[in-house]
Image (cartoon, coloured by chain):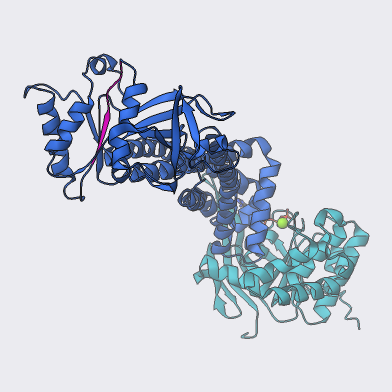
Amino acid sequence: MNVYESIVIAVDSVRAHKLRSSLTLLSIGIGVFAIIASSGITGTLQQTVSSQLADLGENSMLIQRTPSINFGHSWRKYRTRKDITPDIARGLRERMTTTSLISVSNTNNGFTIQSGQESSNPDVALIGIDDMYFEVNAISLQEGRAFTEQEATIGNNVAIIGTDLLPLFPDGKPLGKTITIRNQQFTVVGVLERKGGIIGQSQDNRVLIPLAVFIKYYTFRWDTSVDIAIKAYTKESVAATFDEAVGIMRTLRDLKPWEENDFEIDLNEALAGQFNNLSMAIVVVAWISGLGALVAAGIGIMNMMLVSVKERTREIGVRKALGARRRWITRQFLIESVTLCQLGGATGVAGGLLTSWGVTLIVRTTSVPGLDFVFPWFAVVFSVIACTMIGVGFGLYPAWRAASLDPIEALRYE
Amino acid sequence: MSDAIIDIRHIAKVYEMGNEEVHALRDVSLTVGANEYIALMGPSGSGKSTLMNMLGCLDTPSSGTYLFNGQSVGDMSDDDLAEIRNQEIGFVFQTFNLLPRASALQNVELPLVYSGAPRSERSRRAEDALTRVGLADRIDHRPNELSGGQRQRVAIARALVTQPSIILADEPTGNLDSKTGQDIMALFDELWRSGNTVILVTHEEEIARHAQRIIRLRDGLVESDQPNEFHATPL
Ligand SMILES: Nc1ncnc2c1ncn2[C@@H]1O[C@H](COP(=O)(O)OP(=O)(O)OP(=O)(O)O)[C@@H](O)[C@H]1O
Ligand SMILES: [Mg+2]
């Protein structure tokens, strides 16, 4: 009865002082909201990104003329860099001793794929690949086959499509069909396994063709640079492979010892790490400000409780006269302040979950199909615990004040 | 004297008001035995409420000794005093002092909550007490849905629900009209007749006439302590 009664009183006192209590509850709500929403959103994105970066292959690294994630603004520095030509790639491949898992590819965007009457969106990525591509990038097929070594080197007009292009084939059977890419006809030999996407970019909206064909028909004169993916055999050999690749690249590009690398080389882990650092920073900032809001709200709660103790002085006197021990009075007011905190916290949890779920939904429909909402369990549990602790922490003084009231004086209080 | 419920000796109570000292009680000694019916009278400010609060273990004396059922109250902690108030004393106030948000039943249950009685026993005993004061049909009403007399009946039910050694009432009819006051007094008479010990404070001779013994205070001293010559022992 005491617990239930205290909860009812807490809810009552919120209703009785709408403005004052809604401001206090709101600030608790905002604090919890920041914690839940930031964890929910970053958790969802992080899970997707790290699983996809991991898909790119463990222990692998990527050599490119310019970085793929560019946080800086030194475009000038990158623009003057020489291309990484297929010759350089071949040279690297021949000289590398620590690993043989080296794949050369090149990507261009903005292609329209046609098949019979059907036509795709004009935003398909076309990727020229060699025969090592699947092995190095840990990509697999859900249907059909990879290119044979012969197809890849000689350059037959064969293609492997991503799942986004399946609607081009109304009968659902793409294998053996012909697709047209800018006047060139290709025979579909395989379908990539569905991957979802890294933020903003579907990984399935693409077509793979042999690199030789790609270079022949689809490279722009100003961008003939290829990307080189290298995979170390083991985790332990990553560093050695990395160093060897850097050394050979420098030699191939005639760099003097004092000159900087004129190419980018990134470990997949480093790319994942960059993203993780970014989301970690968001979470840390959100949690710190959320906790700050909670502490500020705690002071509001304390004020509310002190007012409540004052308003109910007589009631406290009656309870003491009837034999309530200090412990009972303390407990009653603590339950009340925890209830207040949980009321505010519940709105924050609901708002935070709704927001991160909404963001997940938007990202999923606009850019990343297959994005799953990751329920931020830890943040929710943490918020409930934090609200309880704040309720207890900031309710302690008012509760102590109530319990220490002199019964006679409390009964006389008007 | 070992069967006395209350035994106070040379009790004094001094309130500090700034640099002024108010001697609410100067030197009061008295004993109260089982099943006594006492009216405490005296002019305003003579110390009646102070003495009642002291007897009810709501307050402790500045000097003197107070033995309640042989135990010295002066040495007790807050929680020990709370337990005595809960188990041994039933308090009835002039202003009823019911919890406004609670029903009659919940108000009467309150002392049982604090004594740790199980829920089912609580409501059974509270219903019995309300039946005894004639409010069996009002148990779910809140105080603001009850008349003054009915509120005081709830308060009396609350005072007797723990079966205390003694019932203390500070001007229990002070806020009631005289007809309702008489009804309430009939209730106290009934409690006394069934074996309870009752002490009540009053200004009215007519009310005091119900008691067996009348103690008059003046300026913090006992002016007189006599059996009530008008007391007819009915039955
Ligand atoms: N908390 C207090 N602080 C200071 N003085 C007090 C306090 N309580 C009572 N007094 C003083 O003690 C004296 C006795 O007060 P008490 O309330 O016992 O009188 P009373 O006999 O009950 O009077 P009434 O008939 O008006 O209720 C009064 O002079 C009063 O002013
Ligand atoms: Mg008085």
> Observer-nearest residue: B7 or B108?
B108
Left or right? Give the position of A313 relative to B104: left
Instruction: Say whether residue A228 is magenta.
Output: yes
> Observer-nearest residue: A317 or B191?
A317
Left or right? Give the position of A46 relative to B5: left
At x 61%, y 72%, the residue is B84
Left or right? Give the position of B213 relative to A382: right
Give residue A73's quadrant in the image.
top left
> Observer-nearest residue: B139 or A384?
A384
Chain appearing in cyan on the rendered image: B
Is residue B235 in sight in this rendering?
A: yes
Is residue A161 in sight in this rendering?
A: no
Chain appearing in blue on the rendered image: A
Instruction: Say whether residue B7 is magenta.
Output: no
Instruction: Please state the horizontal and vertical placement of residue A133, each as a whole percent of the image.
Output: 31, 40
Q: How many marks?
A: 0
At x 43%, y 37%, the residue is A286
Residue, far right: B179
Q: Which residues are magenta?
A: A222-230
- Ligand 1 found in image quarter: bottom right
Give residue B49's quadrant in the image.
bottom right
Name above or below for residue A137 compared with residue A87.
Answer: below
